[in-house]
Amino acid sequence: MQLEEVGKYLLRKLKEGLPGQLPYHNVAHTVDVYMSTEHISRREGVGGHDLNLLLTAALFHDSGFLVGSNGHEEESCRIARETLPKFEYTNDEIDTICQMIMTTSLPQSPKNKLENILADADLDYLGRHDFLKISKKLYDENFALGLVSNEIEWDEMQIKFLKNHKYFTNSSIKLREPIKYVNLLQIEDRLKKARQK
């Protein structure tokens, strides 16, 4: 597995090929999920070959946005299957990577430790202090794509999402759940004030 080389290749491809109206699903998000995957893996005691598989899945998990947003997880797997043999990944490794990528589709339903880690890394920001800033980027993207019509509707969607979301790894439950709850309260408060205007 040539993780470093495939990382450089894919990030360059994403920079050149992703549509400009994606303020959230862009290279910064891919790098964020990659870093979160690395941090969660360390806390969960995962390293070596398994970590390389996880980091590769993190790199490719939203590469399907190069083609479009609908069914992007399947496209991400197709791109991974097309690309990774050139970087000395075996078919079994690619199958494992694609299973992890599919775990990031919503609602998440990971089935093992590695899938738990990638699922948590993809939504790590929900339980971080930069949640509002990142959430605004996702709102801007959904608004541009016509998936949401105003900020009140967006906050209603976010509240429902935050209430239904759960982290899967012990370290994310411990580290992110308390901050996620604070973020939920902030959105509920903002929505309440917006409705009173």
Image (cartoon, helix red, strand yellow):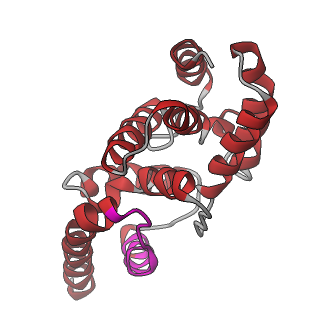
Q: Main secondary structure of the magenta part?
A: helix
Relative to 99, is 21 on the left or the right?
Answer: left
Relative to 71, is 52 on the left or the right?
Answer: left
x and y percent of residue 8 in the render? 52, 14
Which image quadrant for residue 57?
top right
x and y percent of residue 22 in the render? 51, 40
Which image quadrant for residue 150?
bottom left
x and y percent of residue 59 in the render? 54, 32
Quick check: is 169 in the magenta stretch? yes
> Which quadrant, please, contains the N terminus?
top right
Q: Residue at x 61, y 68 (%)?
A: 109
Towards the viewer: 126 or 153: 126
Q: Residue at x 23, y 69 (%)?
A: 183
Region of the chain picked out in magenta, as a range:
153-170
Residue 10 higher or lower than 180, as above or below = above
x and y percent of residue 160 in the render? 43, 80
Residue 189 higher or lower than 171, as above or below = below
Q: Residue at x 74, y 22 (%)?
A: 83
Callout count: 0
Quick check: is 155 in the magenta stretch? yes
Relative to 17, is 158 on the left or the right?
Answer: left
Q: Residue at x 62, y 64 (%)?
A: 111
